[in-house]
Amino acid sequence: MSHTWTNYGSATDIELFDFDILVTTLHGLLKDPEMLHYSEVEQLMVLFEKASYLEKHKVIALQEYSLTSFFETAERLLGKLYLERKKIKADSLSYRYPDLSVSDAMAAEITQLNELSAFGLRLHNGVINFIKNVMPRLGIDNSEYLYIGSTSFEFKTSIGYPPDFEGTKYHIRNSDIYWDIPTGILNDHQDLGSYKHQIYVLAIKWHANPHIMNGDLPTQTGTNVTSFLLYDSKINEFDVSNLTSPISVVFPYRKSTGYNKEFLKCQYYDESTNTFSKIGCGHGFVDSVQLPCTT
């Protein structure tokens, strides 16, 4: 593990054949997340971040299987963090910290939860950054890249012009969460022009919440967390505002134990406070199974 870690000093040190070795190594280590020691997560995160900042010309040359393996590895790593969080909440302090006083054990738990939160945020940002770097490899005849994972996330990313997306429903896959995109989403960016510059759309459905929370009922989410981004070829995100009609996020929802629809709220993750907030969000029920979240 340490040998693999120290072999790569920076993203520019990683060549294409190194990337395949790197992904295969990480993939093997994460085959059984329970067998991976918690102290090794930091080293994996460093390797992952270096890979996520690969130079663009190297990303363009990557093969399909390499990309798929990379995203599977990211899924497993996020799954590891998710399992660690669940274990913290399930095991008693005395079991996890038998040699510490109650106050010291509580402090140690807070430290570990904070570390998991930091790892989760770094992995979240690393995944998004890597997907953005993948986009230049897609030509106009291959305008979408789809990854359907089963452990932690799935996503679809597309290239097109503003009219290609306006007034449409953007699905990762059918019969699931979708984004209802109104016309005029980029009215504040007149320099784009209708068919002057291509834009990039990225939608992610996180099965394992990337924002590590404390596990208490008021902070749990009743549906999957999603990300939806619009950006240009230089990976600059667009500030979408002053919309006549909002972008609606529609969730298929079925009641499960512990959640009643009257208690469900639409929230977004506020990166300035690292908490979920409902300020500026509205919601309503289309019917008994769908909850649209508009922002």
Image (tube, rainbow, N blue to C red):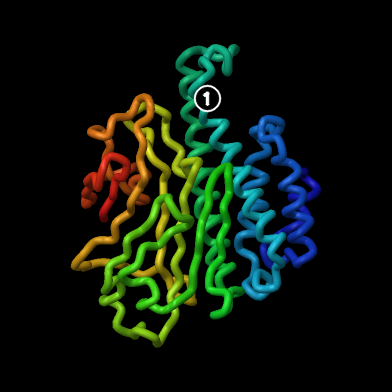
Residue at screen point 37% across, 25% down? 257
Q: Which of 43 and 78 is in front in this view?
A: 78
Asked if residue 267 lies left or right of residue 9, the reply is: left
Compared to residue 45, the image places residue 156 above or below, namely below
Q: Which residue position is annotated with label 1? A: 88
The quarter of the image holding the C terminus is bottom left
Residue drawn at x 51%, y 51% is 124
Dot 1: what SS? helix
The kind of residue on which mark 1 rests is Ile
Quadrant where the image shows the N terminus: top right
Q: Quadrant of residue 100?
A: top right
Q: Where is residue 58 in the image (x, y as percent from the top left)?
A: 69, 71
In this rendering, the answer to whether 290 lies above or below 162 is above
Which residue is at the far bottom? 196
Pinpoint residue 23: horizontal percent, then vertical percent. Answer: 72, 53
Q: Which of 123 and 260 is in front in this view?
A: 260
**How many numbered discs?**
1
In the image, what residue occupies the spot 58% across and 42% down?
Answer: 151
Image quarter of residue 195: bottom left
Q: Residues within 10 Å of mark 1 (few under 14, many from 20)?
A: some
- Of the pair 123 and 205, the residue shown nearer to us: 205
| In the image: residue 50, left or right of residue 93 | right
Return the x and y of residue 275 as percentages of the image width and height.
34, 42
Farthest residue to the left: give it. Answer: 244
Measuring from the top left, give residue 56's x and y in whole percent: 62, 72
Q: In this view, does 104 lie above or below 211?
A: above
The image quadrant of residue 34 is: top right
Q: Residue at x 22, y 46 (%)?
A: 284
